[in-house]
Image: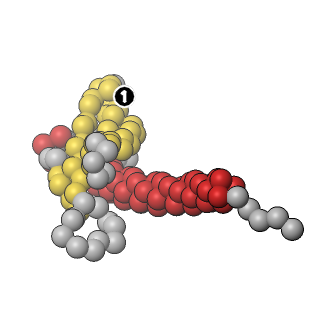
Amino acid sequence: MHGLTLAEVMIALGIGALLYAGILSGYILTTSRAEWTAYWLAAQALATDRLEQTRAAKWDTQAFPPVDQLLPSNFPPRVDILDLPISGALIPYATSTVTITLVSSNPPLKCIRVDTTWSFKHRGTFTNTVVTYRGPDQ
């Protein structure tokens, strides 16, 4: 019966270390991606919330006098806390900007665009965008 040489043991330890490092880096990457996805979903919910606010604004062209609350001045940029579980002093913020553009006056149609900008750790800034079209109330 013969034993293992020192070289064989070192190669086996090296392969084991590489395998362990690969598993650990995969776990860290998966955790970071899951956290980024949580930020993205929270920003998307914030953008959708702002879009629903514009959809709830009164815009009645048949009233006398006509009512138009769907104006950019009624929806200034807003900074909110992202709806995430928070531990510690690091609070994630996002800025939502609403852009309202008149597409057509006859028939009346406006384009509503909401951009929600947020940052994730040291990877830069990201933007979620939601766009819809809206006609006046009937």
Instruction: List x then y, in percent, for residue 110.
Output: 32, 34
Nearer to me, 44 or 39 = 39
Residue positioned 22% across, 57% down in the render: 93
Residue positioned 17% across, 52% down in the render: 78
Q: Is residue 18 left or right of residue 69?
A: right
Instruction: List x then y, in percent, for residue 29.
Output: 48, 54
Residue positioned 16% across, 47% down in the render: 77
Q: Residue at label 1? A: 107
Query: For residue 72, which quarter of the picture?
Result: top left
The residue lying furthest to the right in this view is 1
The residue lying furthest to the front in this view is 2
Q: Amino acid at mark 1?
A: Pro
Q: Is residue 102 left or right of residue 65?
A: right
Nearer to me, 123 or 60 = 123
Instruction: List x then y, in percent, for residue 20.
Output: 57, 60
Instruction: List x then y, in percent, for residue 68.
Output: 20, 43
Against 96, residue 21 (above or below) is: below
Badge 1 crowding class, 10 Å Cα cut-off, few under 14, some 14 to 19, many 20 or more, is: few
Against 33, residue 59 (above or below) is: above
Q: Name the colour scheme.
A: secondary structure
In this rendering, does residue 99 appear at all?
A: yes
Query: For residue 102, which quarter of the picture?
Result: top left
Label 1: which secondary element: loop
Q: Is residue 30 left or right of residue 36?
A: right
Nearer to me, 108 or 28 = 28
